[in-house]
Image: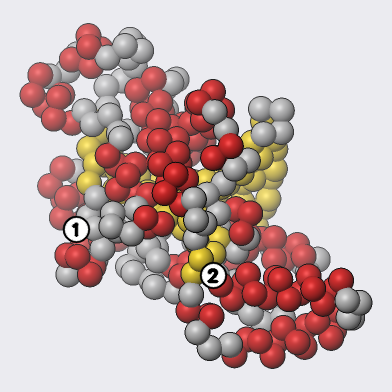
Amino acid sequence: MNQEIRTDLALEVKERFQEDNVEVKGVVLEEQEKADGKIRISTVEITDRHGAQVMRKPIGRYVTLEMQTLLQIGSEEQEMLSSEVGEQLRQLLRHKGCSKVLVVGLGNREVTPDSLGPRVADQLLITRHLLREYGSGFLQKNLSGMAGKKEVELSAVAPGVMAQTGMEAVEIVQGIVREIQPDLVIAIDALAARSVARVTTTVQLTDTGICPGAGIGNNRRALNEESIGCPVIAIGVPTVVDAATIVRDSMEQLLQEQGYSKREIELFLESMDSMKGVDTMFVTPKSIDEAIGSVSEILAEGINQCFFFGSEA
């Protein structure tokens, strides 16, 4: 089938080749489970230019955390997930000195499925102004759990979207980076998934940066080390899936149940590729308001734990 997969998740791109029994040179997949199987961790490593070309993603490391539906878990499980996000972020930071960190909350605050970035930025422990006003040692004295840890200047911005500002997010971030000169930028954004089951239940962390809107075909300039001059880690959660994917998956399952051959199903699905209207629509769960609230808390707490309350990054 020739349909292009619309997804921001490297894991889903890799799975497409596994379904076709194709091994991709330059792409390594590792999987593990934690918390009695409640959290599944998949790491896709793109190691060379061939792997990057086939995957259509930059060389680097893509870590995916898959969890049960967030709306069905309690505060104890949310804390566990936050800790795992913080731990995976620390692992991505392992050879990067980070005393000044800028978090960029990408997306449109007025559109719920796209508001993840700004919502995370709102809940971070911002310390840059405190350290500049009161000096080194302030956090050690006033923040419980900071004893013996390096004090980090954490700042955050939610640059909005081009329709609101007339500027691409990367242009705004470039100006801020020139002014405050962070050691690291962390970009938070809502993503698109190929699988309905992964919407609001999956977190992807990558050290390659991000191209906002890529999963829905609305590409903006990439936010990465090349474009802004310092390392960029991107953290995202899928909040939408395209409608054409849902229709195709439903029809494929129906035809399989009715006994059609694989070739017959492929021919029928290929004839659907010219569907008008559906291929430009994206779907989000009816519980997206509550899901964004839960996910934003988990990501914000994970970042806070990474820099202020966990072991050294």
Can you say whether 213 is above or below 47 in the image?
Answer: below
Identify the image quadrant of the N terminus. bottom right
Name the residue: 70% across, 38% down.
32
Among the 4 quarters of the image, the one containing residue 212: bottom left
Judged left or right of residue 252, residue 96 is left
Disc 1 residue crowd, few under 14, some 14–19, many 20+, Cα 10 Å = some
Residue 210: x, y in percent? 40, 58
Judged left or right of residue 136, residue 3 is right
Can you say whether 299 is above or below 201 in the image?
Answer: above
Judged left or right of residue 221, residue 36 is right
Residue 245: x, y in percent? 62, 72
Name the residue: 30% across, 34% down.
124
Helix, strand or loop status at disc 2 = strand
Q: Which residue is mark 1?
A: 172
Q: Which residue is mark 2?
A: 242
Helix, strand or loop status at disc 1 = helix
Nearest the camera: 281 or 35? 281
Residue 234: x, y in percent? 41, 49
Q: From the viewer's perspective, is the residue at label 2 or at label 1 nearer?
A: 2
Mark earlier in primary sequence (2, 1)? 1
Residue lying at the far front in this picture: please name it.
Answer: 286
Question: Taking the image as drawn, is residue 120 in sight?
Answer: yes
Residue 90: x, y in percent? 46, 32
Name the residue: 52% across, 46% down.
203
Question: Taking the image as drawn, is residue 61 in sight?
Answer: no
Nearest the camera: 146 or 286? 286
Can you say whether 255 is above or below 103 in the image?
Answer: below
Residue type at mark 1 is: Ile
Mark identifier at residue 289: none
Distance of label 2 from label 1 (alpha carbons)? 29 Å
Among the 4 quarters of the image, the one containing residue 257: bottom right
Residue type at mark 2 is: Asp
